[in-house]
Amino acid sequence: MRVAYFTHSLASCWNHGNAHFLRGVLSELIARGHAVRALEPAGNWSLANLLADAGEDGLSPYRAAYPELSSESFAADADPAALVGDADLVIVHEWNDPPLVAAIGALRKAGGRFTLLFHDTHHRAVSDPEAIHAFDLSGYDGVLAFGETLAAVYRRWGWGNRVWTWHEAADTRLFHPPAEELERSGLVWIGNWGEGERTQEIEEYLLRPAEAAGLPLDIFGVRYPDAARALLATHGAHYRGWAPNARAPEIFARHLATVHVPRRYYATVLPGIPTIRMFEALACGIPLVSAPWDDAEHLFRPGIDYLVAPNGAAMTRHLQDLHGDSALRASLAAHGLETVRARHTCAHRVDELLAIVDALGAATHPATARNVA
């Protein structure tokens, strides 16, 4: 099968978590013999910020980890038909511009012999629904939503059985426990500050508990304004700046534990959607404690795969327990890793994608014999 994926960026993971998942999925498709093309807008904001932060060297970890991957940049006035080419499957991520999304849909409506899917991995459907309604999806065969509560929003919008829940997952080729255990110490959190929508949660469930537990805390991420950095310093946390996602496994391997602090929308109106960092951390075998988050889809085993803290005091106690109890750390690491490997790898997601494409191919292209496996 020939696959074309229109992403915001494959090359850059700067404030762009979808790149993590996309790299793993495209690598898995390539490993299975599919022809893959990733297309990204020239001058996209994620790549521009990465280059401003770290220069060309900032791309080296990605290139070293994924030598089989590359992406094609396209200008705003590029011909959509030329970009789609002879693809059998076209997936368009929701961070693309509405005119491009509409133009590709128009190609499909005009008789394009490809399956066309829209991929939503954000909370804008509830936080800024007009931004999603700006997309003309009338030519699309279906929607891939990265959580069941998000899929339910699309069903309410009339998509019915043409929307599928397609969770993110860990690329276990890259994200796995270290081959040889190193000395571990302190806590780590890899996450972006963003628009300050979880400032209260970061302080209550990360900064104060780490300080109260007497554990050093390293924080990696971007978009930390001066006020945020000052808050980190007030609690004794060490801000380490941006880290390429390909280096996250080695960062996790140096620390005793990590913390999951979901963005507010994923803890309230879109429950059950974990950040991709949760999949990646558990795949790396690092013990994890979560701030309040409802695993509404039963993706994991709370209390077995990770600990849950209903409040800041409980988070402090969990961190103290993890610091002093090596058996607890080993149990959480083993069980979390077991669940990811059994259910939440990019290989699992490719299996799901191919099943969706197969079903759509039979329904929407009955006269066309195509290789979808």
Image (cartoon, helix red, strand yellow):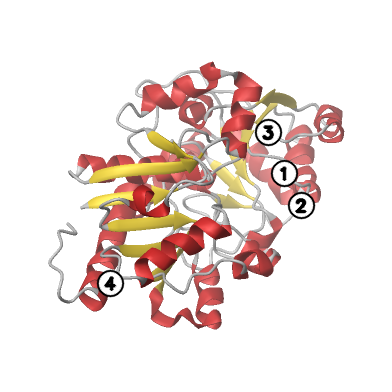
Q: Nearer the viewer, residue 152 or 46?
A: 46
Mark number, residue 139: none
Amino acid carrying mark 3 in the image: Val
Give SS at disc 3.
Answer: loop
Residues tagged 4 and 1 counted as in contact (Cβ below 8 A) = no
Q: CA distance from mark 3 to mark 1?
A: 8 Å
Q: CA distance from mark 4 to mark 1?
A: 37 Å
Give SS at disc 2.
Answer: loop
Give SS at disc 4.
Answer: helix
Q: CA distance from mark 2 to mark 3?
A: 14 Å
Amino acid carrying mark 4 in the image: Leu
Question: Dot 1, how many residues are within 10 Å of its Cα: few (below 14), some (14-19), or many (20+)?
Answer: some
Which of marks 1 and 3 precedes in the sequence? 1
Q: Residue 258, position in %: x, y?
A: 59, 38
- The reply, left or right, for residue 34 in relation to residue 208 is left
For the point 45% across and 22% down, the residue is 61
Q: Nearer the viewer, residue 250 or 180?
A: 250
Q: Quadrant of residue 69?
A: top left
Residue 34 visible in the current orientation: yes
Instruction: Name the residue tied to disc 1.
Output: 194
Instruction: Name the residue tied to disc 4.
Output: 360
Amino acid carrying mark 2 in the image: Glu
Instruction: Name the residue tied to disc 3.
Output: 222
Instruction: Name the residue tied to disc 2.
Output: 197
Q: CA distance from mark 2 to mark 1?
A: 7 Å
The mark closer to the camera, 4 or 3, is 4
Amino acid carrying mark 1 in the image: Gly
Q: CA distance from mark 4 to mark 3?
A: 39 Å
Q: Quadrant of residue 117?
A: bottom left
Q: Residue 248, position in %: x, y?
A: 50, 30
Q: CA distance from mark 2 to mark 4?
A: 38 Å
